[in-house]
Image (cartoon, helix red, strand yellow):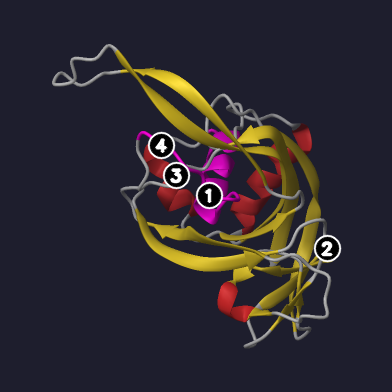
Amino acid sequence: MKGVVFTVKGSYARFRRPYTTTSALTFTLIHPIAVKGLIGSILGIDYNDLYHFTHDLKVGIQVLNPVYKDMQSFNLNAITGNNKARNFQSTIEFLRDVEYRVFVSGDEDKLLEIENILRDNSFRFTPYLGNSEHVAKIRYEGSYDVLKISENLCHSVLPKENILIDEHDQVDVYIDRIPVQNDINREYIKYQYVGYAVNNQLLKTTGNPDIYHIGDHYVYLF
């Protein structure tokens, strides 16, 4: 089994929590479904075909930068007929100075297509991080064998219940509940509590999660 690895970074990002409306909050990291959307944009996959193309891909995510958030207020135009106001104010949350390392595994023909696009920087559409205003910079890192390992260590995001918290370790652990699966209508159908460290720090694991060695990293794949 092979895995393609690349980094993606941006000055700002926003991965909106779907239950928020006028006060739009963001997840604290890019999630697997957003990664698949990013892959679709660089390959130029039609919106209606994206689910079928990416459904069987496995995705790992390493959060490289600490999490910083900004809040900004915007005047938005009212577009519904029963809203007589011309505009209304909304407070929107953003992530700032984000960088992720992404691991993708699955069908080798699809991986080769992704790898060729990444090597050449010949993206079909401009990649962005949640919103079209937040343009992403992508750097290809390589293609590697994906090897199952028994070490109880992980660089990437993994389920919260598989994180072993050691009070003697100097590691800050971030926790969030993110979508990890959607359906053909692009609706989120499965959420999971996950944890992660930043700055290339390792987490200790428990419960024997499936951890893979990809390049120089220990990775959990969603």
Does residue 203 show up magenta in the picture? no
Residue at image point 44% right, 44% down:
50
Residue at image point 46% right, 21% down:
74
For the C terminus, the quadrant is bottom right
Q: Badges 4 and 3: C-beta atoms under 8 Å apart?
A: no
**Of marks 3 and 2, which one's residue comes earlier in the chain?**
3
Q: Badges 1 and 2: C-beta atoms under 8 Å apart?
A: no
Q: What residue is pinned by disc 2?
A: 215
Q: Secondary structure at mark 3?
A: helix
Q: What residue is pinned by disc 3?
A: 50
**Of marks 2 and 4, which one's residue comes earlier in the chain?**
4
Q: Badges 1 and 3: C-beta atoms under 8 Å apart?
A: no
Residue at image point 76% right, 33% down:
120
Residue 8 vs 87, above or below: the answer is below
Residue 77 is situated, as x and y percent measured from the top left of the image, at 33, 16
Q: Is residue 222 visible?
A: no
Q: Is residue 40 left or right of residue 183?
A: right
Distance of label 4 from label 3 (alpha carbons): 29 Å
* Foreground tag (2 vs 4): 4
Residue 210 vs 25, above or below: the answer is below
Q: Amino acid at mark 4?
A: Ser
Q: Is residue 123 left or right of residue 32?
A: right
For the N terminus, the quadrant is bottom right
Q: What residue is pinned by disc 1?
A: 27
**Of marks 4 and 3, which one's residue comes earlier in the chain?**
4
Q: Residues within 10 Å of mark 1 (few under 14, many from 20)?
A: some
> Magenta stretch?
22-44
